[in-house]
Amino acid sequence: MAGFQLAVIEGRSREKEFSFTKELVKLGHDPKNDLIMNDCLVSPFHAEICLDKDHYRIIDLGNTYPALVNGSEAEGSYLSDGDEITIGKSKFRFSGKTEAGGKAKKLNLPPARQLILIGLILLCLIYLLIPSGKKDEEQPGEEKVPTVTRRTEKPPETTLKEAELQEYSQLTREERLNEALKSYELGKKKQEDWRISLGNLHASIKLFEKSLYLMDNLETRPEIYQDTRDRLAEAQDKLEEIFKEHRFTVEKYLRFKQWEQARSELITIQELIPDRSDPRAVYARDKLEQVEKARRKAWK
């Protein structure tokens, strides 16, 4: 008989194991699911694990925080023994057995994905074979930093503290450039991993702001300057979008006096935006105080 197990390796039910023999298993916080998850980051119907030609696959049902398989988004991914599935704040280790009696094994990519992969490889080869033109001559042993001409546009507003700005102003040009490049690379990593940890998106914004501030006072700006500006704007927009989704949910729960659910959403906002001076964090803190008062009153 086909079946699979999900062993909880992170989350509330750590070290617990769930076993299923159905061909379709639904996961989410709605009571109609096969695996009910009481997690503010989990949607009512979050994901499905189904048997497809003797192999299990997981399908994300379209969520703000999508299901991940080994750190990558689950887009109909086939599952193998030992794969780690992240849903909300919980992480599971998958193990399964098919009708044929064998363990779930890695599958080759579906034909459509094979074609996409081949196309990408061909594009990379074409790019590498096209002559890149004559490069600027460099002095032997001299490291050249790509630069662009100085622009006159207004630098983006920063939320950096006065003490931080004072510290950066003491750095030499080389130190500022190295620190700017380091902050840019770390900011990119945080931005790309924003689904893995709630605070990553906010951290990326701080790092991009730091990088821009350090580059803004250089006589010439590195090529990454404009990309840093674009990434900062993208991260700010995404954070605002997620905040508005949670705020809408909070107001809905408050309207129906669902204090526990509202409290969970407000705590999530605080994890998203750890800067206590941020107006959105202030909103969460003030609402949380109201919720705590309402909870105490309800207990009496």
Image (cartoon, rainbow, N blue to C red):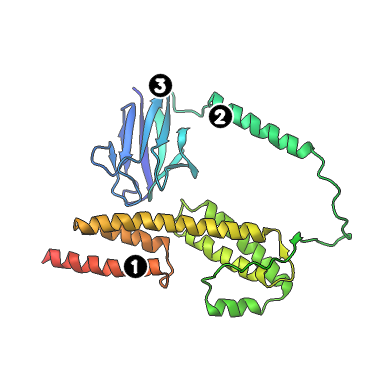
Q: Circle 3 — which element?
A: loop
* Rendered residue at 48%/41% (across/down): 73
Q: Quadrant of the N terminus?
A: top left
Give whichever of 84, 221 is nearer the camera.
Answer: 221
- For label 3, the residue is 101
Q: Circle 2 — which element?
A: helix
Q: Nearer the viewer, mark 1 or mark 2?
A: 1
Give whichever of 181, 37 is nearer the camera.
Answer: 181
Q: What is the spatial separation of the Cα atoms under label 3 and label 1, in whole angstroms?
A: 55 Å
Q: What is the spatial separation of the Cα atoms under label 1 and label 2, in whole angstroms?
A: 45 Å
The kind of residue tagged 1 is: Tyr
**Nearest to N terminus: mark 1 or mark 2:** 2
Give whichever of 40, 161 is nearer the camera.
Answer: 161
- For label 2, the residue is 113
| Label 1 crowd bin: few (<14), some (14–19), many (20+), radius 10 Å | some
Residue 270 vs residue 154: left or right?
left
Q: Quadrant of the C terminus?
A: bottom left
Residue 283 disc label: 1
Q: Find residue 37 and report its horizontal and vertical position in percent.
A: 30, 45
